[in-house]
Amino acid sequence: MPEVLKAPLVVEFPFTRSLGPVQSAFLTGLRERVVLGVRTGDGRVLVPPVEYDPVTSEELSELVEVAATGTVTTWAWNHEPRRAQPLDRPFAWVLVRLDGADTALLHALDAPGGPDSVRTGMRVRVRWAAERSGGITDLACFEPHDDGISELTGSDGRFEDLVTGIVVPARLDYTYSPGRAQTAYIQALAERRVVGERCPSCRKVYVPPRGACPTCGVATSERVEVGPRGTVTTYCIVNIKAKNLDIEVPYVYAHIALDGADLALHGRIGGIPYDQVRMGLRVEPVWADGGGHPDHYRPTGEPDADYETYKELV
């Protein structure tokens, strides 16, 4: 059995969020070394603050300062910190109920003594970041503290130059394995062939193959070469240029039913003005230079396919 492919992949994008008055005050407070919670109708103080009571759904707005000291309610040791985590050495993830709060805040605890030095009930305090800009990272981490409750600043939650929005880089690092069926599909593309798999029950051929029939749910293994020509079943005109994609707009992205396949795949249509692309247009692949995939599809010059021949694939 051929080796199944795998490759490291990264999904990364900037996440932009506009802040309402409660979150705006909370993050601005961190910039000013103040921790704020919000009071509910029954008198509880929630930290971090939320805009609506999680029990009654009542809108919340009364901000309350709490202390920068608190008690660990539970914890877990992190032996191998990952990229962009609060500390670059082993630390504990802790839930800390700050003095004056009724809920716990999740953050890192710097514990040089290792996991044996951490316990539920231990007293800790906030370690502020040296440079603060109005984000949760302004609270660098917690550290052990046995000298009582820290003094409040007397803040009422009103600040100048409020933080009204944040941009957070979201990133996911993972290893992707396409599995047996798609490994064979990718290897065939490297040879400029398109291979699907036939369901033993309904006899339909699916491209790209997933190793199981999406209709019947049974395993598939019979490989069938399809295409390379196909029919445009439906399409859209793209008018917004994507970042890092060197394609001029407008262009057409289409679902293409390859000859012999019972599932349409998608691809870009080229070699024809965008306003001349149509359902039923017969197309063929134009392979990327040195790449194991079609760069786009172009018209073959054949007569358009009759709608009855592809209507089930629209």
Image (cartoon, rainbow, N blue to C red):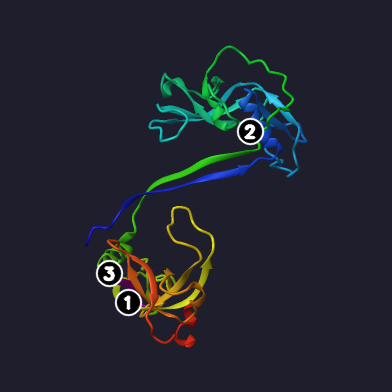
Q: Separation of disc 1 and disc 3 at Cα?
A: 11 Å
| Residues at marks 2 and 3 touching, judged by CB atoms closer than 8 Å | no
| Residue farthest toward the top in the current orientation of the protein | 147
Q: Nearer the viewer, residue 42 or 304?
A: 304
Q: Residues within 10 Å of mark 1 (few under 14, many from 20)?
A: many
Q: Residues within 10 Å of mark 3 (few under 14, many from 20)?
A: some
Q: Residues within 10 Å of mark 2 (few under 14, many from 20)?
A: some
Question: Which residue is painted at 67% across and 28% down in the image?
Answer: 36
Q: Is residue 41 magenta?
A: no
Q: Is residue 212 visible?
A: no
* Relative to 239, residue 53 above or below: above
| Residues at marks 1 and 2 touching, judged by CB atoms closer than 8 Å | no
Type of residue at label 1?
Answer: Val
| Residue 301 image position (x, y, % from top left) | 38, 83
Query: Quick one: label 2 or label 3, which is nearer the N terminus?
Result: 2
Q: What residue is pinned by disc 3?
A: 192
Q: What residue is pinned by disc 2?
A: 48
Task: Determine the image quadrant of residue 231.
Answer: bottom left
Type of residue at label 3?
Answer: Arg
* Relative to 212, residue 8 above or below: above
Task: Determine the image quadrant of residue 267.
Answer: bottom left
| Residue 53 image position (x, y, % from top left) | 71, 40
Q: Nearer the viewer, residue 223 or 23?
A: 23
Q: Which residues are magenta?
A: 194-201
| Residue 125 image position (x, y, % from top left) | 56, 20
Q: Is residue 309 visible?
A: yes
Q: Nearer the viewer, mark 1 or mark 3?
A: 3
Q: Secondary structure at mark 3?
A: loop
Q: What residue is pinned by disc 1?
A: 226
Q: Is residue 199 magenta?
A: yes
Q: Which mark is residue 108?
A: none
Q: Nearer the viewer, residue 142 or 170?
A: 170
